[in-house]
Amino acid sequence: MNKLHLWLFAGMCIVTAHASAGLFSDDDAREKIQQLEVRIVQLEKANIKLEDANKQQTGSMLDLLTQIESLNQELRRLRGQNEELDHNLQDAKNRQKDFYVDLDARMRHFEAAEAAAQTASTQKAADKSTAEDAAAVESSAYEVVYDYYKAANYQKVLESSREFLQKFPDSGRVPNVHYLMGDAYFSLDDFKKSIASYQVIVSKYESSSNVPDALLNIGACQQQLKDLASAKKTLKLLIAKYPDSKAAKKAKQRLAAFK
């Protein structure tokens, strides 16, 4: 039994009690009943509003609980995503660390290789510079010999030639120096030493362009020494080995003069 029914029952009891007591007239009783009915209607409306309010409140509570549960689910989902992001971030940090370690190792390797290359380049440049300096010194020494030769200062030619051969025994100008020495000795009438100087070219430097002329000059020295047989033999060797050379043409002319 709800509150409205209790109020109605209480009102009826009061009316009945008053009627039985004879305290009120019929009109008064009727008026009281009408008032009670109005009160009952009001109470019923209030009760309906209260029930509606309770229903609305219950619905609101259910909606609120639904929202709270939805928020909890969203929170759990976000926490899961956050944990996944933290895990991915840690993996990224580890990969980045490994990358930088590998990059550092590579950079050190490249730096070492670059330093080695730089050292090699520097050494090569130094060697080149040294070689150029040596070549310049060698060229200068040869020019000294040749300048004395052009000046017909044959003693100085011999002195500077010996110094050159001592300092630059592997020079490509060695055959030329021996040739200049042979000419210097010839000009000084030292025909035997002249032959010896020319013979070095013939024996040790067969690919030198000076060989045909050296043979021709050896023949000339032998002729000066009155060794005509050796001179003829040398000239014939020249003609046989270097038939197209200018020296061979001169050798033929000299052989013809011997006859």
Image: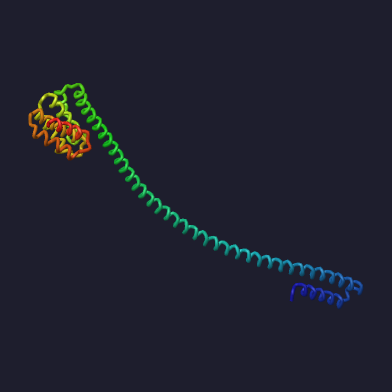
Q: Is residue 71 left or right of residue 191?
A: right
User: Percent x, y for residue 245?
Assistant: 22, 36
Quick one: 33 or 59, which is closer to the camera? 59
Residue at (89, 73) in percent of width and height:
30
User: Image height check: is 4 above or below 89?
Assistant: below
Quick one: 217 or 106, which is closer to the camera? 217
Residue at (15, 34) in percent of width and height:
215
Locate the N terminus by quadrant.
bottom right
Determine if residue 113 is in view: yes
Residue 167: image quadrant is top left
Residue at (82, 76) in percent of width and height:
12
Residue 173: image quadrant is top left
Quick one: 22 or 15, which is closer to the camera? 15
User: Percent x, y for residue 56?
Assistant: 71, 66
User: Percent x, y for residue 251?
Assistant: 17, 33
Quick one: 248 or 252, which is closer to the camera? 252
Color style of the picture: rainbow
Locate the C terminus by quadrant.
top left
Task: Report how many numbered discs are placed on residues in the image.
Answer: 0
User: Image height check: is 44 above or below 175?
Assistant: below
Query: Furthest-bottom residue in view?
Result: 20
User: Percent x, y for residue 140?
Assistant: 23, 27
Determine if residue 166 is in view: no
Residue 237: image quadrant is top left
